[in-house]
Image (cartoon, coloured by chain):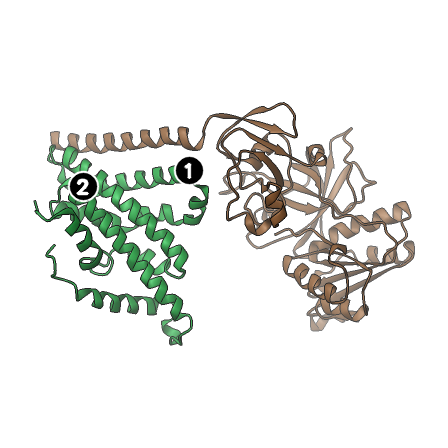
């Protein structure tokens, strides 16, 4: 088990080991939903929330169900089931409590089920042998990091509307290049905290 | 072997546990059990919670007009929600004026009935009824427009005003999960109380129009509800223009037949816009009104006549044709029926020509 403090893991997951820009997980919604700052913010918030929640739940499933029974190899399928159910539940709760938020998130909420960054966080948490609190911190940090990255991309793309992009690169093309440059910038932080 | 069984057991157990939580959550959160619905100060009735208000009302045989079928795009299903219903949603705001929001007007298709709710519906909507009809005749008007005659059962008298519309309940067919409702103007005159005729153009991938054009046969039974709408002729001394595009001729055929039957006198010009000659229909019938109705003239116009059409009449976009025919149009009335694009374009031209905005009438079936 790693002995890093939960806060260190939280900060490191946001800036140093950003799940999106250093592991390139969750790229599809990152490219598809980063056209508008507003929707990017909504999706980012939803991902951050679900990521925190599922990393905690998956930790419990792994530590108290799979590990004692020697069924670690089932973690992929078990985690996916837990994530899908959690997203459904969150969707129902949001629809009940805040229809406005529900409509603002719209289709993005169910789409989170297939966001690989969510599953990635749960799997990393197992590989790195985090404790429950560390897992929560890692989940929350990765979620915030993902949200920050998509917000930054949406901001860039808003500016890009006024720039002359070569026709062949418009849309996803230039976005992938931008993501690459952003990832290069984030490499500058790497190694500050070993993870 | 034991390993496999444990693995399967754990997965099944985990799945079942999560499914159970979801089922309980759905019971508790989405379908919140029966709630009380009060309509127009009548005694409250118990309805299942969690459903959109529009479908709750439809189940109670109260038919609030909805041209889009509950997708929040037509803005017709406005009702006043006095109690319950939550706050106005972003999907509703484009359809509501500030004073409507103040007056607690909502779109029935967007409001979910979760708590005890009190609503107010215009009294005439309570008279809208559902009818079972039989397809009496289908007539091909053009290559993509059909006239369908729907007969009511014996003893049923269907009363409506010329220009109003009905909704067809499209039954469930391939891949369609639930019945959908689509609105069509009545083209037959109100004097004909035993049947209605509808003019329906085939829309590519349209749910109801595909059904009508490909599956509906003479003798089939259908459910319709209506009548709806306040698209009827204002019997004022003012001169009027009728502008129809494609299947939008339907309400005008009803209005003209009604005028002829009742001897209504009004100066009217009917503009009928189509692409080429193969899109025109009912021309003889409409030209004949020129003799029966004093002050009536009929102007068919083609936007892109085919070289072989041998077309002597007006050409160009219908808005240009109207503009050519009329100089200043102050004090005139305009009745429009056609695609949303045509209606928007006509409203712009007409207001430029001096027609007051509250004298332009249309139903926009989006």
Closer to the camera in the image, A99 or A27:
A99
Residue B316 place in picture, x, y as percent: 72, 70
Q: Quadrant of residue B182?
A: top right
Q: Is residue B69 above or below residue A34?
A: above
Element type where label 2 sits in the image: helix
Lateral position of residue B132 relative to residue B233, left or right = left
Q: Is residue B67 above or below residue A60?
A: below
To which chain does the residue with label 1 belong?
A: A
Residue B238 place in picture, x, y as percent: 86, 56
Lateral position of residue B51 relative to residue B217, left or right = left
Lateral position of residue A59 relative to residue B246, left or right = left
Q: Is the Cβ of the residue at disc 1 closer than 8 Å to that at disc 2?
A: no
Q: Which quadrant holds the N terminus of chain B?
A: top left
Q: Is residue A80 visible?
A: no
Q: Quadrant of residue B153?
A: top right
To which chain does the residue with label 2 belong?
A: A
Which chain has been coloured brown in this picture?
B
Sequence order check: which comes first, mark 1 or mark 2?
A: 2
Which chain has been coloured green in this picture?
A
Label placed on residue A97: 1
Which residue does the image show at 40% across and 75% down from the upper left?
A163
Element type where label 1 sits in the image: helix
Which residue does the image show at 43% across and 48% down from the upper left?
A106
Label placed on residue B169: none
Q: Which residue in the protein does label 2 denote?
A: A75
Q: Is residue A116 above or below residue B125?
A: below
Which residue does the image show at 56% across and 38% down from the upper left?
B179
Residue A102 place in picture, x, y as percent: 42, 44
Which residue does the image show at 34% across and 68% down from the upper left?
A173
Q: Is residue B272 visible?
A: yes
């Amino acid at each position: 088990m790693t002995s890093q403090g939960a806060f260190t893991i939280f900060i490191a997951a946001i800036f140093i080991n950003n799940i999106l820009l250093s592991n390139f997980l969750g790229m599809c919604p990152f490219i598809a939903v980063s056209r508008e700052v507003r929707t990017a913010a909504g999706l980012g918030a939803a991902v951050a929330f679900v990521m925190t929640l599922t990393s905690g739940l998956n930790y419990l499933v792994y530590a108290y169900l799979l590990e004692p029974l020697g069924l670690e190899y089932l973690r992929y399928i078990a985690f996916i089931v837990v994530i899908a159910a959690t997203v459904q539940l969150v969707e129902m709760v949001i629809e009940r409590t805040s229809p406005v938020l529900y409509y603002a998130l719209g289709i993005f909420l169910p789409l989170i089920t297939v966001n690989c960054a969510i599953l990635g966080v749960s799997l990393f948490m197992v590989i790195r042998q985090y404790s429950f609190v560390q897992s929560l911190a890692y989940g929350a940090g990765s979620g915030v990091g993902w949200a920050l990255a998509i917000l930054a991309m949406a901001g860039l793309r808003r500016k890009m509307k006024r720039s002359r992009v070569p026709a062949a690169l418009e849309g996803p093309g230039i976005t992938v290049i931008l993501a690459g440059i952003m990832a290069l910038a984030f490499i500058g932080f790497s190694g500050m905290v070993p993870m | 072997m034991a390993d496999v069984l444990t693995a399967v057991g754990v997965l099944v157990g985990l799945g079942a546990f999560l499914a159970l939580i979801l089922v309980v959550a759905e019971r508790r959160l989405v379908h919140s059990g029966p709630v009380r619905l009060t309509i127009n100060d009548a005694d409250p009735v118990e309805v299942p919670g969690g459903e959109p208000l529009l479908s709750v009302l439809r189940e109670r045989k109260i038919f609030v007009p909805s041209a889009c079928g509950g997708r929040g795009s037509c803005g017709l299903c406005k009702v006043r929600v006095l109690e319950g219903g939550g706050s106005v949603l972003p999907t509703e705001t484009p359809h509501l004026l500030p004073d409507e929001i103040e007056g607690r007007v909502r779109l029935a298709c967007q409001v979910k009935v979760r708590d005890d709710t009190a609503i107010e519906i215009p009294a005439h909507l309570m008279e809208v009824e559902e009818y079972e009809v039989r397809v009496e005749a289908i007539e091909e008007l053009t290559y993509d427009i059909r006239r369908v005659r729907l007969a009511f059962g014996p003893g049923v008298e269907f009363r409506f005003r010329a220009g109003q519309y009905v909704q067809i309940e499209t039954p469930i067919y391939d891949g369609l999960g639930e019945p959908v409702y689509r609105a069509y103007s009545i083209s037959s005159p109100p004097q004909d109380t035993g049947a209605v005729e509808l003019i329906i153009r085939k829309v590519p991938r349209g749910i109801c129009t595909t059904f009508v054009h490909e599956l509906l046969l003479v003798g089939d039974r259908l459910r319709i509800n209506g009548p709806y709408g306040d698209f009827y002729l204002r019997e004022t001394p003012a001169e009027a223009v009728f502008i129809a595009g494609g299947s939008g001729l339907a309400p005008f055929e009803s209005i003209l037949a009604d005028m002829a039957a009742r001897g209504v006198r009004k100066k009217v010009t009917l503009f009928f816009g189509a692409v080429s000659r193969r899109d025109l229909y009912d021309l003889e019938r409409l030209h004949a009104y020129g003799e029966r109705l004093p002050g009536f003239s009929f102007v068919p116009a083609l936007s892109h006549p085919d070289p072989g059409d041998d077309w002597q009449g007006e050409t160009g976009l219908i808005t240009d044709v109207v503009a050519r025919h009329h100089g200043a149009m102050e004090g005139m009335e305009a009745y429009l029926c056609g695609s949303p694009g045509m209606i928007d374009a006509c409203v712009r031209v007409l207001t430029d020509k001096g027609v007051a905005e509250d004298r332009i009438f249309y139903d926009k079936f989006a």
